[in-house]
Image (cartoon, helix red, strand yellow):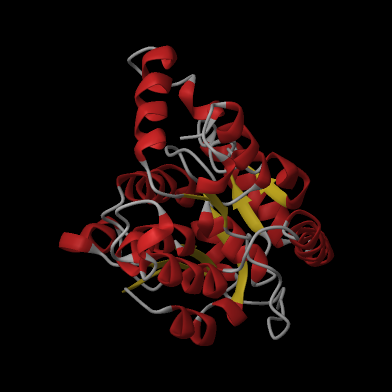
Amino acid sequence: VGPDALALLSPPPAATRKLEHAHSRRADYIVTVSDDDREFLVRDGIPARKILVCRIPQPLADAAYDPDGRYLTFVGYAHHVPNYLSVKAFIDTVFPHLEGYCSSHDLRLAIIGGDCRGRYAALRRDRLVEAPGHLDLAEIRARYYPHTCLSRAPLVAGSGVKGKILEAMAHRLPVVTTDVGLQGLAQFRDCVIRIDMDDPRGAADAIRRSLEDREGRRELSKRAARKLVEYGSSGEDLPSLRARLDQIARTPASGGPLRDARRFLQPFWWWFAR
């Protein structure tokens, strides 16, 4: 939970901070995704040696953006409630204002992610909306990302750094998101198309203007890639972090009961990737 989200929580932030601080002090290691978060934790009294920074993804050399792609793509598991609520809000309120444009320009919404109890499929399933369910990253990279004109992250709930936005930028995709989606990513505010989900028609108009501006989307793609390099130069990439945690788990003198680094890292990786 980042400091910007604490102000929205109940009970009062002071009580939440106290509880968070107590859990952080008991942790063997804390994985964060930015130097700013690391500094925040150090100021909060967490020993620096316990904090591991996982570098945000970098632009992929083999990823190329196609402004003429046919998909507006969202990636996120349905059983994560903020994902489902965001997709539902977009389909119920914004997409009706885009249907005609998408139909006439042969564009599709792609909603990718484990669809527990058919939540996504129940929202809408026709020629304009695809919900293929869970796909691993290799499948997404092969089937959808090369043909995506916009990555959608119209989040209406959630806190912290949004892995889905960083992943899209690493694949050189321009991103549509909200102020909620940008929590923890303030340095990327000029790299996205911002919409207000409380104004569905205005959000649809902003997306339509972006779809009509090929060069503008191409420039957003380049700008985001430059920012990823600029802000992602510190920390460790995920494979080296995984190896380090494995080494920690095998070292009895590492100073804590971290017995299974892979088990410890798995929830983090699921969040970071999605």
**Count of numbered circles on the image:** 0
210 relative to 243, above or below: above
* 9 or 115: nearer the viewer: 9
Quadrant in which residue 246 is drawn? bottom left
Left or right, 212 with respect to 21, comes to right
- Residue 24 image offset from top left, x and y in percent: 41, 36
18 relative to 116, above or below: above
Image quarter (top left, top right, bottom left or bottom right) of the N terminus: top left
Left or right, 230 with respect to 23, comes to right
| Residue furthest to the front | 253
- At 33% from the left edge and 15% from the top edge, which residue is drawn? 11
Image quarter (top left, top right, bottom left or bottom right) of the C terminus: bottom left
* 101 or 124: nearer the viewer: 124
Left or right, 31 with respect to 87, comes to right
* 25 or 82: nearer the viewer: 25
Residue 42 visible in the shown view:
yes
- Residue 59 image offset from top left, x and y in percent: 71, 71
- Residue 56 image offset from top left, x and y in percent: 63, 60
- Residue 114 image offset from top left, x and y in percent: 29, 67
| Residue furthest to the left | 117
Left or right, 129 with respect to 4, comes to left
Residue 9 visible in the shown view:
no
- At 60% from the left edge and 40% from the top edge, which residue is drawn? 37
- At 39% from the left edge and 79% from the top edge, which residue is drawn? 136
- At 75% from the left edge and 60% from the top edge, which residue is drawn? 233
* 196 or 53: nearer the viewer: 53
